[in-house]
């Protein structure tokens, strides 16, 4: 049997808590005769001088943008946006997406949008995954939007479940958004003998597609 693990989205913290959002956990498939294939969880959004790196990078927040921003991973995702204006009300950069860098803060009061994800047609129709979350503003509201592919909109929108979209930042004292959990999709030319985890099974154009929204296994 092949093990299919669906990663969880990163957990948010309260805006300007001094603690960055948690990174998402990895998704992977492993088993006999294959090299384990892993998609890294996204980096947690920045808070003050701390920001997460991962499959895609978290957006930098007040002060962290002058020092660092979350780094993406080659062939998986892009860096988060930077906070370039360290004066009130302290706008943050957007989170990186699978297909695009997170937007830098556009001014001290206008935060960056999340980077767009990547469109994939493995199921037979095109679906966009892994958009970055919108940046928040420390001392004000924000109209920043999440990237295409499930990224949450400011302030504090959650990433869409089973897209791997990032959560959005929030103002001081408010909860930021949680990241959306991931998904693992397999396309094969032969039917599985058995599965666990209740994958969604479709058969586009003569293929067998197994979409795992939850952790499980597949046996051929």
Image (cartoon, rainbow, N blue to C red):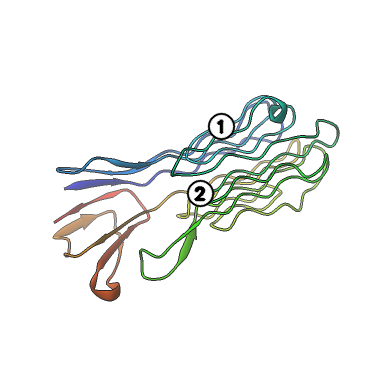
Q: Is residue 86 above or below residue 171?
A: above
Furthest toward the bottom, the residue is 205
Horizontal side of 39 relative to 115 (left or right) equals left
Give the label, 2 or 1, closer to the camera.
2
- For disc 1, the neighbor class at 10 Å (few under 14, some 14 to 19, many from 20) is many
Q: Position of residue 54 (x, y in %)?
A: 49, 36
- For disc 2, the neighbor class at 10 Å (few under 14, some 14 to 19, many from 20) is many
Horizontal side of 165 relative to 194 (left or right) equals right
Res. 123 image quadrant: bottom left
Residue located beneath label 1 in the image: 52
Horizontal side of 6 relative to 201 (left or right) equals right
Question: Rounded to the nearest whole Å, what is the CA distance between mark 2 and mark 1?
Answer: 15 Å
Identify which residue is drawn at 64% across, 38% down.
59
Residue located beneath label 2 in the image: 98
Identify which residue is drawn at 27% across, 72% down.
203
Furthest toward the right, the residue is 88
Q: Is residue 157 above or below residue 207?
A: above
Q: Position of residue 173 (x, y in %)?
A: 74, 36
Viewer-closest of 44 and 84: 84
Mark 2 and 1 residues: CB-CB less than 8 Å, in contact?
no
Q: Position of residue 204 (x, y in %)?
A: 30, 73
Res. 202 image quadrant: bottom left
Report how many numbered discs are placed on residues in the image.
Answer: 2
Disc 1 element: loop
Identify which residue is drawn at 13% across, 56% down.
220
Q: Position of residue 32 (x, y in %)?
A: 15, 42
Viewer-closest of 198 and 66: 66
Q: Is residue 56 above or below residue 48?
A: below
Disc 2 element: loop
Of the image marks 2 and 1, the number of the one nearer the N terminus: 1
Furthest toward the front, the residue is 74
The circle drawn on residue 21 is: none
């Amino acid at each position: 049997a092949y093990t299919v693990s669906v990663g969880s989205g990163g957990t948010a913290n309260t805006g300007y808590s001094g603690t960055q959002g948690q990174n998402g956990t990895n998704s992977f498939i492993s088993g006999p005769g294959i090299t384990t294939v892993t998609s890294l969880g996204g980096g947690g959004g920045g808070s003050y001088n701390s920001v997460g790196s991962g499959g895609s990078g978290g957006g930098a927040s007040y002060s962290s943008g002058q020092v660092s921003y979350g780094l993406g991973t080659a062939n998986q995702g892009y860096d988060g946006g930077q906070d370039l204006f360290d004066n009130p009300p302290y706008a943050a950069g957007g989170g990186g997406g699978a297909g695009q860098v997170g937007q830098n803060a556009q001014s001290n009061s206008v935060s960056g949008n999340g980077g767009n994800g990547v469109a994939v047609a493995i199921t037979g129709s095109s679906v966009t995954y892994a958009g970055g979350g919108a940046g928040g503003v420390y001392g004000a509201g924000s109209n920043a939007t999440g990237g295409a592919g499930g990224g949450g909109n400011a302030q504090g929108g959650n990433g869409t479940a089973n897209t791997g979209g990032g959560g959005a930042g929030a103002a001081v004292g408010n909860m930021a958004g949680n990241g959306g959990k991931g998904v693992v999709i397999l396309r094969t030319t032969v039917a599985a003998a058995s599965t666990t985890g209740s994958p969604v099974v479709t058969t586009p154009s003569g293929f067998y597609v197994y979409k795992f929204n939850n952790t499980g296994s597949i046996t051929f």
